[in-house]
Amino acid sequence: MVGAVQEGIVRELNGFEFDTNGYDRAVTKQQQLRCEEESKWYEEEIDDDLKLCYALNSVLHRGVSKYQEIALIDTKHFGKALIIDGKMQSTEVDEFIYHESLIHPPLLFHPNPKTVFIMGGGEGSAAREVLRHNTVQRVVMCDIDEEVVDFCRTYLSANWAAFASDRLCLVINDARAELEKSREKFDVIVGDLADPVEGGPCYQLYTKSFYEHVVKPKLTDRGIFVTQAGPAGVLTHREVFSSIYNTLRHVFKYVKAYTAHVPSFADTWGWVMASDHPFSQTAQQINERIKERVDGELLYLSGESLISSTTLNKSVYKSLLNETHVYTEDDARFIHGHGRARCA
């Protein structure tokens, strides 16, 4: 999930600014990374009156691309963390929860996935998980920001093998434009996109028209679409999760929402799968497919945990059932933050 925009800074009481070869000149004052001798913290604004703070060992790298600001920090609790435009994208301690939940459910529900298109996913973790499936012959990963991709390919060693795979086709382009011009259809299309934020164009990749006229026509007959769908906690699921779910219900016959707690996000996170064919596999059948198809052991998902993740608590379930909002270009919902980077 690359390019989500919220405010994030590292505080320092002494006022010493961390210098990274002139990048500070391109960063807003509020988002400057600063060092303090005894206590360094990464601070992320979740709402006007709510912030999360993460104790730091160090700031490992910073950069500014044409589209977004990038940082790699070493946190005391979650290890190395990738920050895009002040929003924590993933940490080495628990990123497997997000990426296993995003990738494996649609591939395991599909009878024989051979081709996969990833919108966004510049850090390479989504592609890494797709490539663990021995049925997959071709993965197209399309991200608009070449500098983010190069940054992640250089610094995120866990994904080096994925970037080097001859089954991966890396495309630097706008994901919508790439899908529209493609003559290829895909068994699974993945939305590993930035969260929809006001001022950013990513919300256009969550709209009914995009799903109906761009995504769905590029799926094969039994194709499955999956997207990350933002915070899905009791207090946060109405921001975008319920609306994304309802929007997909207006385009596909079968829509399945599921959630998992991601500790570094300090919230429950949501994903939504959609298809014109039912998601009918049992936990036992999913476990058999994991054993047959997936290279290595999954750290988070099993057949039982996947099925149980689709059972939502009463508050969230009722909200999804009663949601009426449909994403359009003129009527969108946003999470807290301000966009400036282009999407995917």
Image: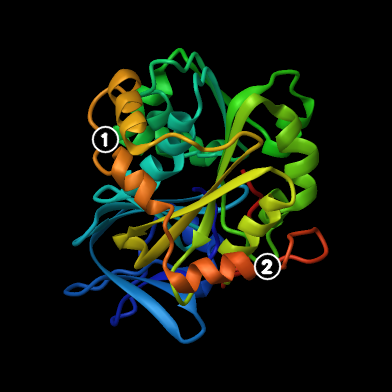
Q: Between residues 7 and 130, which one lies in front from this camera angle?
A: 130
238 left or right of 232 in image: right
Q: Residue at x 50, y 41 (%)?
A: 148
Q: Residue at x 41, y 17 (%)?
A: 165
Q: Which residue is tagged 1?
A: 298
Across and down, in percent, residue 170 comes to 55, 24
Q: Residue at x 38, y 31 (%)?
A: 129
Mark 2 Cα-neighbour bin, 10 Å: few <14, some 14–19, many ≥20: some
Mark 1 Cα-neighbour bin, 10 Å: few <14, some 14–19, many ≥20: some
Q: Between residues 50 and 312, which one lies in front from this camera angle?
A: 312
Q: Residue at x 57, y 58 (%)?
A: 195
Which label is found at residue 198?
Answer: 2
Residue 287 visible (yes or no): yes
Q: Quadrant of the C terminus?
A: top right
Q: What residue type is disc 1 on?
A: Leu
Which badge, 2 or 1, is on the more N-terminal residue?
2
Name the colour scheme.
rainbow
Marks 2/1: CA–CA distance? 36 Å
Quadrant in the picture for residue 74: bottom left
